[in-house]
Image: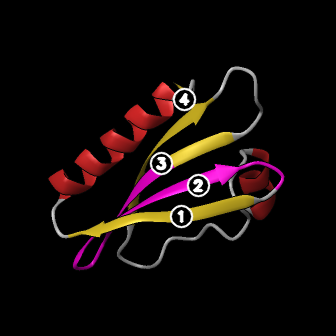
Amino acid sequence: MSDADRIQEGRPASEELPAGSRREAEEYRRPTSVDLVRLAVYEQPGGFLVTEERVGSATLVATLGRLAARADAAALLRRRASQLETQGFARVS
């Protein structure tokens, strides 16, 4: 995928996964805002990285945790998703 395609889809141009990594993501949007929040779990050698990406005029990435088990990573993602929904965000993907 080209950088132009990534940018058009609202993803950073430099979004390349390291070799051996895989990403699963959910996206949330507040009905009154154009900002997008993407929660992602990256499978990496030795564990799972959970991140929150806030996509607007710039993309801010926060690490929510690094966990050894997929179930723990999924639980962390679900807790953060629940917090976002409480704040008025709705899942869009």
Main secondary structure type of the part rendered in magenta: strand
Check disc 3: other Cα within 10 Å, few if <14, some if 14-19, many if 20+: many
What is the number of the mark on residue 87?
A: 4
Sequence-wise, the earlier of marks 3 and 2 is 3
Sequence-wise, the earlier of marks 4 and 1 is 1
Tell me the kind of residue under disc 4: Gln
Sequence-wise, the earlier of marks 2 and 4 is 2
Sequence-wise, the earlier of marks 1 and 2 is 2
Check disc 2: other Cα within 10 Å, few if <14, some if 14-19, many if 20+: some
Image quadrant of residue 69?
bottom left
- Of the 4 image quadrants, the one containing the N terminus is bottom right
Image quadrant of residue 29?
top right
**Residue lying furthest top:** 31
Tell me the kind of residue under disc 3: Leu
Placement of 28 over or under 9, stated as above or below: above
Placement of 81 over or under 47, stated as above or below: above
Queried whether the magenta region covers residue 42, the answer comes back as yes
Label 1–label 2 contact, CB within 8 A: yes
* Residue in view at x 59 percent, y 43 percent: 37
Question: Between 7 and 57, which is closer to the camera in this rendering?
Answer: 57
Q: CA distance from mark 4 to mark 1?
A: 18 Å
- Horizontal and vertical percent position of residue 82: 38, 32
What is the number of the mark on residue 62?
A: 1
Question: Between 43 and 71, which is closer to the camera in this rendering?
Answer: 71
* Residue in view at x 22 percent, y 79 percent: 46
Q: CA distance from mark 1 to mark 2?
A: 6 Å
Sequence-wise, the earlier of marks 1 and 3 is 3
**Residue placed under numbered mark 3 in the picture:** 39
